[in-house]
Every structure is written in structure tokens, then in C-alpha cells.
Amino acid sequence: MIGLKLVGISLIISGFGGWGLAGARRMDRRVGELRDLRIALGFLEKEITTMYTPLSLALQRTQEFSDLPVAHLFRDSASALEMKQGATIREAWRQGIASMLSHSALLPGDIKVLENAAGQLGMSNASEQSKMFALIQEELKLQEEKARDQVKSSRQLWSYGGFIMGAVVVILLL
């Protein structure tokens, strides 16, 4: 009987501890995804403003350059444009954002920055596009710095908090 209780106690504590560790990993993933997004948008900017690559092809090349889950954004945006079913770049970009979100740790504030780009992407000359990309990259850099600060302040809380919460639940059940 005591052995069964010990197994239950260890399962509760390890379950809550795993939950806390997963929360800490999610915060780390967000920082990495914001960095990957910023780098990928820099690559897309060069494709559009320097190479004068057509938008759907530039999105494809950026997808090949990008890591997952950021690559989902560019892959689905490019495929929506290539289908030629009347999708605008705004609709294609939002479709790509939705696809990326299902695999991402990004927060609504991060997505808002990307959605702001939807209305301006491919709508002006190369110098205006360059300004737009610089602005978006700067906003993403600010989001990345905020996320990095959040990781520093909250990582231990998530990591240890899960195990402590598990211990509290065990104490309450005893």
C-alpha cells in the first residue's frame, strides 16, 4: 500500500514538474522563433529589394532558408499565391501566419507585428519595401529582447514552480 502511494506521489510531482519545464522550454522557443523570423525577413528583404525576385518565388526561397516553424509562414504564403485563385498577398500572408501559429510558441503581440506587414508587403517600390522590412525587423528585435528578459526573470519560476506545485498538491492530498 505504501509503495502504491509513493508511486502516486512521484507521478504527481513529476507530472507538475514536467508541466513547469515545458513552460520554461516554450519561453526559450519563443525567443528562438523571434530571432529566426527576424533573420528570415532580412533574407526576404534582400530577395525582394536587391535581387528583384517575384514575391511568390522570394517567399519560396525564404522558406528553404528558414527553420521550422517559421518556414511554415513562407511556405503557405507562397503556395497560396501560386495557386492563383485570386488570393491577395494579405490573404496569403495571413494564411501563412495561421499555419505557423499551430506549430509556434509566439504570443499575440508577436503575431500583430507580422500582421502589420500584410498590408504593405509587395505594395510599393524596393526602397519603400526596404523601409518596411527594417521597421518590422526592429519591432521583432524589441519583441525578442522583451522575450529574453522574460525568460531571465521567469524561467526558474516555471522550472521549480512545477515541482513545488506538485509537492503542494501531494501535501494537500495527504
Image: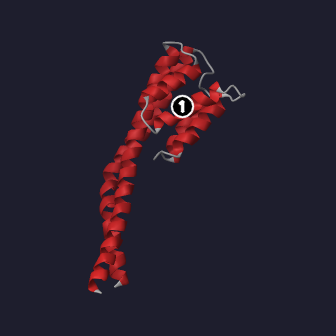
Q: Nearer the viewer, residue 72 or 168?
A: 72
Which quadrant does the N terminus fall into? bottom left
Which amino acid type is shown beneath numbered disc 1?
Answer: Arg
Is 103 situated above or below 61?
below
Is 45 situated above or below 93?
above
Residue under circle 1?
75
**Residue at (52% x, 17% y) in the render:** 48
Is 143 situated above or below 56?
below
Which quadrant does the C terminus fall into? bottom left
Q: Please, which residue is most extreme toward the bottom here?
A: 1
* x, y percent for residue 78: 58, 27
**Residue at (49% x, 12% y) in the render:** 51
Q: Nearer the viewer, residue 141 or 14?
A: 14
Q: Please, which residue is most extreme toward the right here?
A: 86
The reply to whether residue 150 is in sight is no
* x, y percent for residue 67: 42, 34
The reply to whether residue 161 is in sight is yes
* x, y percent for residue 139: 47, 34
Quarter of the rendering containing residue 119: top right
On the picture, is 163 further left or further right than 113? left
On the picture, is 80 further left or further right than 1? right
**Residue at (43% x, 30% y) in the render:** 66
* x, y percent for residue 168: 34, 76
Q: Please, which residue is most extreme toward the top here?
A: 51
